[in-house]
Image: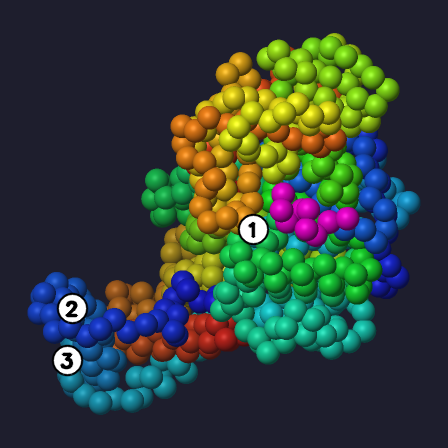
Amino acid sequence: MAIASFAESGADLQLTGITKRFPGFTAIEELDLTIPAGSFFALLGPSGCGKTTTLRLVAGLEEPTAGQILIGGKDVTSTKPFQRPVNTVFQSYALFPHMTILENVAFGLRRRKLGDPVGKAHEALKLVELDHLASRRPAQLSGGQQQRVALARAIVNRPALLLLDEPLGALDLKLRRQMQLELKTIQTEVGLTFLHVTHDQEEAMTMADTVAVMNKGKIEQMGAPEELYELPRTAFVANFLGQSNLFTGEVVASGPDHIAVDVAGVPIVVPRTRAQRHAGEIAIGVRPEKVSLLTSAPLPESGRNVLGPGRVTDVSFSGVSTQYLVDVPGVGELVVFAQNMVFGPVVQVGASVWISWNADHGFGLDDDPGVVPRFVPDASTESIAIQRRIALEEELEQA
Amino acid sequence: MAFTAFASQATVEQAPRKRSWIALVLLLPGIAYLVLFFLAPLISLIITSFQQPVLDGDIGEYTAGFQWQNYTDALGEYWPLVLRSFGFALIATVLALAVSYPIAYFIGVKARRFPLLQSLMLTLVIAPFFISFLLRTLAWKQIMSDEGPIVQFLKTIAILPSDGHLTGTAFSVIFGLTYNFIPFMTLPLYATLERLDTRYLEAGADLYASPFTVFRKVTVPLSMPGIISGTLLTFIPAAGDYINASRDFLGSSSTAMVGNAIEANFLVLQNYPIAAALSIVLMAVILIIVGLYVRRAGTEDLV
């Protein structure tokens, strides 16, 4: 067999110029990506963005149209899946239905003719706390248990690189939290390189050291979760990772530290370092939780941006915070998240309000303003319904 | 488990019992049919197998009796034919499996993305049924006849001696059996392979199994239901077949199978008790073999 020993530690993964075309469409376009050894890397994106294809290319289940894949410095582009030091936790788990749990976990070890496959399989099952079910068949286990078996079956081989294809998608919230913690613990304990593919931004942000946001076969932005959230570079990232209020306007003043953008006649100040473009028509934004809601016109204050007055068009209570939709004439609808410091909402629908935020919290995008939507009403019931439908369709596809 | 094709699962939940006359009434035609056309002839056959000849009677005249010797006589005279039947049937089943598996795999797995090709190929598998079984077998007799191109060719390249034949040999009989039962093997294989989840194959490859190991450890075990039904559908009728081995078709007296002996005793020699005894023996042996096979294949841990 190809590899007759355990990987000492995780290996780094390098993709250079990867392109994958299927008949009729291009799934991945000129993708360059380096994942350092031992890191937990998340590929985040909506369905159809090419993230699962990327994973399958790394696993060897698809062949790239162009480009190179290097694992631990070795070119594996033309090798078959069984020759690669990579294991996958499949979205569907793909546990062999005709084998016991123990045999499923020992499968990879037996293929590589490693000593004591049964003992090692038991150890891996203990790690996921399922050793007592070793003699059962996959069909007799719950979804969460099957997921843990799939994980054990992959990590027991100590692959240099572990690929996770939305493995937590089918779990309920509580179990998912638990598994996220377990995965993270295993990753630090075993020191493997994890490549995690998901469309769940929260999952990506809580688990990964580095997140790459993918869209239409390209990586839009890559970085630490905080960095991506606080300083999105494109409108797609700004709206895919959380929500954003976006504006477009001409740069009217440019100082050494700040630039000012004309938004419906009001100069909105953005720190120069947080803006990708510094001249001409640009798109800027601010996160809804950075914005505060005022019931009277605030006094002009340097370092704060103010828009208003506007009318509250929707108030929705979500426990920790309340979300307000504010329609500002000439600007459009804005979202504001306010923490529930008092009982109930501060203002009601129809109230006249001003919104303001610290100028240091704004960010400027790299997109051409023409293509940036003023405000993506991601919070509207309609878009939530669409998201639910996409999630359901994905589940159905798996079934 | 592997046996869904023939046995129901052990853990089927009992439906709550309801006293329902409707169910019984609906079952009645089926039960009546079985009693009339299966149970009654079977009992009649058993009775016939113990009959004894009438003293000073005509040929073919028998009376009720309890003549055990019918069985010892039948086996004593025809045991080589019984052995040959099961040997030929076994070889034909293995050959049919070897030929059918790749066909079924191609139609059921590889051609999945091309439904038109899939249905076309399935039609081709079934197409021979549109022509009578007898005609097709006779056609093979023509093709393999001494003047036919195959024999001529084999003689030219000296595989067959100059006085050799193909018809009337064990080869042609086994060939005929294999050929005639390939659809019965292919269709159940196709039915299971068509449902084979290729994600298991990917998982196998991901876990360091070479394509051959994936086939051996994943594909074959997962297609076990089809393999079992296909082999049974081929083996059982092949063991009792008397057309292929008959001297009018592909066989000769040296290739006679038990079916030919039964036919001869019933229709030519009018020795009904011996024919009936042979039929019962054939049935019993098949039941035992199939029972053992099913038991082994069904309980074996298919790992």
Mark 3 is surrounded, within 10 Å at the Cα level, by few (under 14), some (14 to 19) or many (20 or more) other residues, namely few
Mark 1 is surrounded, within 10 Å at the Cα level, by few (under 14), some (14 to 19) or many (20 or more) other residues, namely some
- The relative height of residue B258 versus residue A226 in the rendered view (above or below) is below
Q: Residue at x 25, y 71 (%)?
A: B15
The residue that label 2 is drawn on is: B31
Chain letter of the residue beneath label 2 in the structure image: B
The answer to whether residue B36 is left or right of residue B129 is left
Q: Magenta part mainly helix, strand or loop?
A: helix
Q: Quadrant of residue B241?
A: bottom left
Which numbered disc covers residue B57?
3
The answer to whether residue B163 is left or right of residue A384 is right
- The relative height of residue B168 versus residue B157 in the rendered view (above or below) is below
Determine the secondary structure under disc 2. helix
- The relative height of residue B241 versus residue A355 in the rendered view (above or below) is below
Q: Nearer the viewer, residue B22 or A276?
A: A276
The answer to whether residue A101 is left or right of residue A304 is left
Q: Residue at x 77, y 48 (%)?
A: A209
Q: Amino acid at mark 2?
A: Ile
Q: Residue furthest right?
A: A73
Q: Answer whether residue B47 is visible to the viewer in this image.
A: yes
Q: Which is closer to the viewer, label 1 or label 3?
A: 1
The residue that label 1 is drawn on is: A169
Q: Residue at x 20, y 78 (%)?
A: B43
Magenta segment: A201-209
Q: Amino acid at mark 3?
A: Gly
x, y (%) of residue B156? Answer: 68, 41
Q: Residue furthest front?
A: A299
Labels in figure, total: 3
Instruction: Report how far apart the C-alphas of labels 2 and 3 lie in the structure.
Output: 38 Å
x, y (%) of residue A169? Answer: 56, 51
Q: Are marks 2 and 3 on the same chain?
A: yes
